[in-house]
Image (spheres, helix red, strand yellow):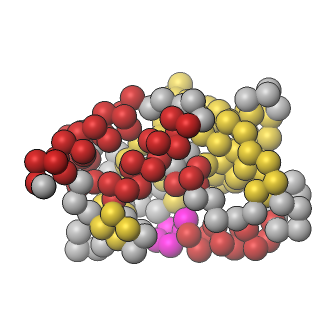
Amino acid sequence: MTHSPLWVFGYGSLIWNPEFPVAEQAVARLDGYHRSFCMHSIHHRGTEEDPGLVLALDAVDGGVCTGVAFRVETGQETPTIDALRERELVSSAYLETVCPVELADGRLVDAVTYIVDPDHVQYCGSMALEAQAQIISQAVGGRGPNDEYLFNTVEHLSQIGITDADLSWLAQRVREIGNAHA
């Protein structure tokens, strides 16, 4: 899977923290999936005792996810895939796939994409937004507070002109919860 050029599709933290050398990036569209907090995080944004939530792509008929496609610098394909697997496949809740994505300029590219395994124990699709907000407002994992992950994602989506109504609602609600506890 380390062919050149190597494209990677980001829809959450990869947008603001890819952690690999990027030669090109573009807003991109992936059909058939929806971005949502449908995966418990027991490593990066929570613990096994107190799981957080992270974004994942959930298969949905007619779904569309707008994110960012990154072209990896030539010669960096193998170390990038190795680093992505260490980061994204830490608990095997994501499935590494290659999906066709459409770049903003109309080009179609095949991109490595991490999609949630709906049969995995960490999958929690269809959780109510209020329940998500309660979890995100208090969970902390190895990469930091769960709310930081949410706020960074919403901010960086906004910077590239992407609005996600559910994430915007969650960010506002999590801030309200935080202010109430302060």
Q: In the image, which residues are magenta?
A: 88-92
Residue 6 shows in the view: no
In the displayed structure, would residue 77 be above or below residue 8? below
**Residue 26 % position (x, y):** 72, 39
Instruction: Residue at 79% x, 71% y: name it.
Output: 78
Please state if 176 lies on the left or on the right of 70 as rendered: left
Viewer-proximal residue, 124 or 45? 45
Residue 153 against residue 75 in the figure, above or below: above
Which residue is nearer to you in this view: 24 or 87?
24
Q: In percent of the image, x 47 and y 47: which residue is there? A: 153
111 sits left or right of 119 in the view:
right
Residue 66: % across, % down: 58, 34
Whether 7 is among the magenta residues is no
132 is higher (above) or lower (below) than 4: above
Q: Is residue 95 left or right of residue 91?
A: right
Would you say the magenta stretch is mainly helix, strand or loop? loop
- Residue 77: which quarter of the image? bottom right
